[in-house]
Amino acid sequence: MSLIMSLNSGSSSLKFQVFRMPAEVLIASGLIERIGLPSSVFTVKANDHEESSTLDIPNHKEAIRLVLESLMSHGIVSDLKDIAGIGHRIVHGGEKYSASVVINEQVEKDIEVLSDLAPLHNPANLLGVRVIDEILPEAVQVAVFDTAFHQTMEPVSYMYPLPYEYYEKYGIRKYGFHGTSHGYVTKRLREILGSENSRRIISCHLGNGGSLAAVKNGKCVNTTMGFTPLAGIMMGTRSGDIDPSILAYLSEKEHLSLQGVTDLCNKKSGLLGVSGISSDMRDIENAIKEGSARAKLACDMYVQRVCNTIAAYAVQLGGVDAILFTAGIGENSIYLRQLIIETLEDAFPIELDRTANNIRRKEAKISTASSRIQVWVIPTNEELVIARDTYRLMK
Ligand code: ADP
């Protein structure tokens, strides 16, 4: 028996889950928000009990110390050495990492170098690794990369039609993100359907951030996020794909730097930008019920982008056996799933089972028995993948 902690260290937040392996039992989880800001919030759930406290947590080292202390005080571990492995979510693994690896000095260096491609994420992820190096030097640390699952894409899918030299000089290409999630949910669906009936899957990870992946025989052949997570479908606050000339045009008109316009595309666009109401799909659904035309427009744009991508991936895959929905919106929004599948019904041999679709957060088939393309909801679990990979690589 081993205790494994999966850690997602963000710039101002830290999420953790502790599993007993190999039984895969979740025994504690928690979240620290607002690290480095006044009134950080620490929430921990253990022994069927959740508690939240507000205190000042100046940095990640203190945050991780606090997590470990609380695991001791809740009786989850009696000695910190009980935690045999720590798996880290690392956003960018570049072209070098197509699978999870045990972290050594070289891996740390690589993650640091790749910060150039993921300046908001990799430094914060690496900070988590370095703090654990200090506090728990004997624990095995494993890196699980968000980009790894997409490394099977061919150049025809990952290259941008820019001068080739920029790929060679700067690594400008499509990397894709949410790979841990797409990998987990498509593998799960292949277990359910059998490999013969799941050769061509389109995976829709629809959360605050969102991406689709086209998966052939278990391998990713295309995905919507690109060089950065700003690309692809419309998201909560991100524009997704837009005409790139808009950036320079807006920069001039609004007297913003290019970085300022990029920030606008990341933080003020998407559902929030179009609706003017919220980035949260629940708020958008409520606003539609109250008659908001802009919320309806935002939602219709979202649906159109998802459907157009599904159609494009159907062509690339040479047909579709199954479409799956996952993440916050994909698992919970009965309304969005209905809009998406009903839009596809005119063009594809697909039919929604409206009664079966009436579920949230659980594994279910939501297409009718006669639908040639099956539609499924598969809850994602990135933390479990991180714990599994860590346990496997420790042995
Ligand atoms: P993140 O990308 O931050 O991990 P999540 O996967 O948690 O995001 O997804 C957050 C999104 O899921 C939000 O837009 C939220 O509105 C949506 N969501 C969560 N529950 C529901 C629900 N019951 N109905 C509709 N949307 C929901």
Image: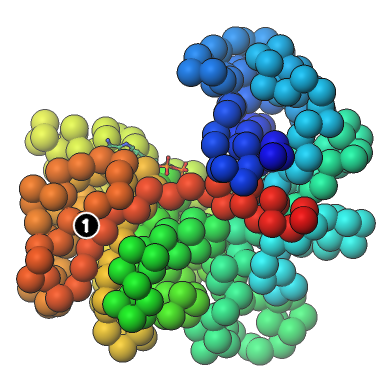
* CB of mark 1 near ligand 1 (< 8 Å): no
Query: What secondary structure is marked by label 1?
Result: strand
* Residue 243 position (above or below residue 111): below
- At 13% across and 50% down in the image, what residue appears? 356
Q: Position of residue 77 (x, y in %)?
A: 73, 23
Q: Which amino acid does label 1 sit on?
A: Lys
Give the quadrant of the N terminus.
Answer: top right
Q: Can residue 354 be seen in this view?
A: yes
Quick one: quadrant of the C terminus?
bottom right
- Position of residue 305 in the picture relative to residue 76 (left or right): left
Q: Position of residue 177 (x, y in %)?
A: 55, 61
Q: Residue furthest front?
A: 1
Q: Nearer the viewer, residue 177 or 291?
A: 177
Quarter location, residue 371? bottom left
Using the rendered image of the protein, determine whether residue 276 is visible from the camera's viewpoint: no
Residue with the mark numbered 1:
365
On screen, residue 247 versus residue 6, left or right, reads: left
Taking the spot 45% from the left edge, 65% from the top edge, the residue there is 187
The colour mode here is rainbow
Q: Residue at the spot x=27%, y=70% of the render? A: 322
Is residue 316 shown above or below 151? below
Residue 24 in which image quadrant? top right
Residue 66 position, x and y percent, is: 74, 19
- Relative side of 136 to 71, left or right: right
| Crowding at mark 1 (Cα within 10 Å: few <14, some 14-19, many 20+) | some
Count of number-bearing discs: 1
Give the residue drawn at x 37%, y 43%. Answer: 328
Q: Nearer the viewer, residue 108 or 393?
A: 393
Question: Which quadrant of the picture is home to ligand 1?
Answer: top left
Image position, residue 291 (x, y; %): 9, 36
Q: Is residue 203 above or below residue 318?
A: above
